[in-house]
Image: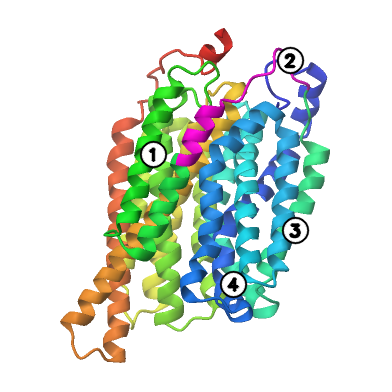
Amino acid sequence: MAASDPDAPPQAAQRAHSLRWFTLTTVALAQLMVVLDSTVVNIALPAAQADLGFTDGERQWVVTAYSLAFGSLLLLGGRLSDLVGRKRTFIIGLIGFAAASALGGAADSFGTLVAARAVQGAFAALLAPTALAVLTTTFTIPKERARAFGVFGAIAGAGGAIGLLLGGVLTEYLSWRWNLYVNVIIAVVAVIGAALFVASVARTGPRPKLDIPGTVLVSAALFALVYGLSNAETDGWDSPFSWGMLIASGVLLVAFVLWQQRAAHPLLPLSIVLDRNRGAAYSAVLIAGAGLFGVFLFVTYFLEKSLGYTPIQTGVSFLPMIGTLVLAAQLSTNIFVPRFGPKVLVPIGMTLATIGMLLFTRLTLDSTYAADLLPAFLILGFGIGTIMPASIQTATLGIEGAYAGVGSALVNTSQQVGGSIGTALLNTLAATAATAYVTAHQPATAAVAGDAAVYSYSVAYWWGAGFFAFGAVLSALLFRRRGVAAPAHRHGAHAAST
């Protein structure tokens, strides 16, 4: 368990406190590795496909294998960090992720690459919630907690854009394989940091038990959800198989909730989710994840396919967004959230993100970077930098130490599910819009095809703006006003009493 737990020995807690900023650096590296991996590999896919000879239909599995394992095992990974110990789980996750990355980088066949990506996702599901739980239990002083979560939230929001830049550089100057090998370098540094700076604390009291039925139910539900959304992305929303998986996911989630109400050792005490502020924060992360994929996916398509940018130029184009995101993250968590609270800050961030997405809808084949793209990047970055740190900090605030891992896993689950929903829905809407445009503008010349692509991206941006606008209203309604106390409850009370 993390060194800052209430039951920790004074010497261990004192050592953890003195090394807390080194702990933040280590956690930030691990989080960056997990988040950027979702986009850095996408840049490498065309080169990997040419090298290994797999088809366009098979290509999606390089991405889907990772997201399926990651999304379905997140809650299990978070709970294991509570049970096994956060330092041990953190190091295991880093080593496993690095080993899977090395296997994928050295892959000589499509099957090996897909298997490596699935293993990557499994260890990412162990690593991501553990990293956040370490941060949650290490930084308990409000001012320091705000600063730490500002850094973590900035990485959570900007990691995808950093992955685009890094993927472009590695693919163009080295090889697609280095998009996977780079994780080994990051993981080695993070393992050394974890060994030196993340304190290990002996468990006190009886060893808690793993909720096996709950784990099976929720893992199967999340697998069916992510798989159904991924299938809808490729086969369309009229696919019976896609809807079958989504319905199965809903049934399994209901069964999971019913089981958690009576389980002696619940995997996820429902009081964690039912807290009004925390539920609002999870919702905000989910909506931001869905909207962000509209930016990373369709703006990348527009820059490379419509304007002819190279992968490196595309990555560099996102840098201003990263800059404003980091600036907003620090301002919001250190100044504005303590003063105004998430009920004010998160809706403001959602509104800014809505404006940024609306600016993207104005893009045409004649658009220029400085006049048309840059303002949208700057505003959107400021919006995401206002949403993510405040939401993540609120989502993990007040969770009992014994459940910090699974509570943190819900943050990652929200972002992952949001991204899956955004990708599947926006891809389908964009494809439908492109087909309709070409049909309405016969004959289908190259110029019409180019205009159809830009039109389809615009449709995706409009929907992305709608996601954020809905998020602004929802967060304004759900978050409690400052000064309104949360209802008293203990998240582990039921388990502890049994």
Query: Does the residue at mark 1 contact the one at mark 3 (Cβ under 8 Å)?
Result: no
Return the residue at label 3: 184
Secondary structure of the residue carrying tag 1 is helix
- Label 2 or label 3, whichever comes before in sequence order: 3
Secondary structure of the residue carrying tag 4 is helix
Amino acid under disc 2: Thr
Q: Position of residue 70 (x, y in %)?
A: 55, 48
Of circles 1 and 4, the one toward us is 4
- Label 1 or label 3, whichever comes before in sequence order: 3
Q: Quadrant of residue 238?
A: bottom left
Query: Residue 352, can we see it?
Result: yes
Q: Where, quadrant-wise, is the C terminus in this rendering?
A: top right
Return the residue at label 1: 283
Return the residue at label 4: 44
Left or right of 449? Residue 73 is right
Q: Which residues are magenta?
A: 202-220
Secondary structure of the residue carrying tag 3 is helix
Label 2, label 3: how far apart the Cα atoms are: 34 Å
Amino acid under disc 3: Val
Query: Residue 147, can we see it?
Result: no
Q: Position of residue 401 (x, y in %)?
A: 61, 22
Label 1, label 2: how far apart the Cα atoms are: 34 Å
